[in-house]
Amino acid sequence: MAAQRGRATGRPPTMKDVAALAGVGLATVSRVINGTPVDPVLTAQVTEAAKQLGYRHDPTASSLRRSDRRTRTVGLILEDVANPFSSLLHRAVEDVTSELGLLLLAGSSDEDPERERSLLGAFHARRVDGLIVVPTGQVNDELQAVRRQGMPIVCVDRAAELDGVDTVTVDNAGGVGDAVRRLHALGHREIAFLGDQVSLWTAQRRWEGFVATMAALACPLREGWVRRDLHGEAAGERAAREVLTGDTLPTALVTSQNLLTIGARYALQDLGLQHTVAHVGFDDFELANLLSPPLSVIAQDPKALGRRASELLLSRLDGYEGPERHVVLPTRYVARGSGEITRPRPGRGDTAR
DNA sequence: CACACGTCTTCGGAAAGGTA
DNA sequence: TACCTTTCCGAAGACGTGTG
């Protein structure tokens, strides 16, 4: 008996089983499941039969027949889902997608192009309706190919100049420029910079913001005060230590990523310079306000990034086929103390000149 | 004639079956 | 063994049928 299949055979019950038990046609079950108005009596019969059998709608079978070929899933490729920035972004995307009944599948690329490629392939093979990606920047050809096959893609946090791919980023250069201008207003001219891996799009933009603003303010850009292509907290600490123990010392320090910021702060504290050398980091992080002095940061809003990226993706899913859109969200300077240390008067102290 | 509901066909891709 | 064809899965959409 078909109606007994779910229990008798161990196979999941289907609409056919529900229809048989409810004494209605298959299409009636489909209409009830999909919310098309049906006689309330029949609706109750179908609902009861589905409940009795433990029927679960099969989205794979559904997408097989649906004219829009939708699977009601969205893929999300993050740098690292364990990273606080990524998890806030993840949550924001999930809030938007779940409201629409879409299932969000997420994975971490770990900045590894191979992993990004593999996740992209897996999501593509599972026919997710769309993708939101924090791109490593080294898998762009594959992203473009997937986009050309019709899958909407939105790049978030980092831009990728690809046809038909929308992007949502923050004003990285502007954020760093703002911090440099604030330091300059406090008298700082000798400002050091620690930068993330140069292959990263964000690292490049932040560096560009630093260089442009330093030039605009006629501040010297000393080779010994710049360390780039750093990865992780330990590298940040090492680089900061080198910069802060050189022949001529900077009076302020800008770190372009949160792990580098933490590493640099270790070095500053270890050298006893945390109250002397001004320090501003890109990206806020937990407990930054509890340090002494509390850390000033250029904060970005990962929730806003996630929300905006979701909105762009959903508009593509709703049929928008216009040119790619590039949304740039502002950063916010959070003054807590470390960035408000004024430049020591020349001739005193152990800093520059 | 309009509406409500049922039947038949179709979808994509994997696996099984058939043929040279 | 290689290649081609058929079957199968569950659900949705087109279309048909019955009823008021």
Image (cartoon, coloured by chain):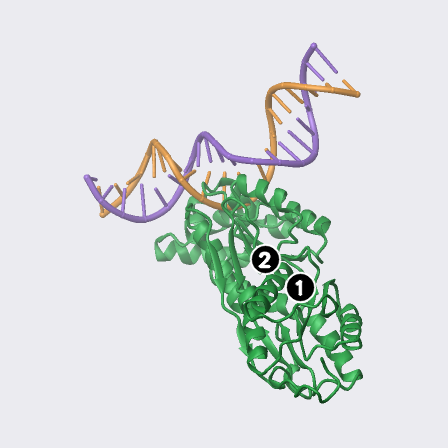
Chain colours: A green, B purple, C orange
A86 lies above or below A240:
above
Return the residue at label 1: A81
**At 51% across and 41% down in the image, what residue appears?**
A150
Chain letter of disc 2?
Answer: A
Sequence order check: which comes first, mark 1 or mark 2?
1
Which residue occupies the foreground of this view, A265 or A99? A265
**At 70% across and 77% down in the image, what residue appears?**
A250
Return the residue at label 2: A158
Chain letter of disc 1?
Answer: A
Residue A218: image location, x then y, percent: 58, 70
Q: Is residue A339 left or right of residue A27?
A: right
A1 lies above or below A352:
above
The N terminus of chain A - image quarter = top right
Looking at the image, do the residues carrying marks 1 and 2 touch, with CB atoms under 8 Å apart?
A: no
> Can I make out residue A152 in this image?
yes
Query: How much space separates mark 1 and mark 2, taking CA atoms?
Result: 16 Å
The C terminus of chain A - image quarter = bottom right
Q: Amino acid at mark 2?
A: Arg
Residue A319: image location, x then y, percent: 41, 47
Asked which secondary structure carries label 1, the reply is loop
Which residue occupies the foreground of this view, A221 or A31? A221
Residue A221: image location, x then y, percent: 66, 67
Would you call the spot at circle 2 few (<14 residues within 10 Å), some (14-19), or many (20 or more)? many
Which residue occupies the foreground of this view, A121 or A68? A121
Residue C7: image location, x then y, percent: 60, 29
Q: Disc 1 vs disc 2: which is toward the camera? A: 2
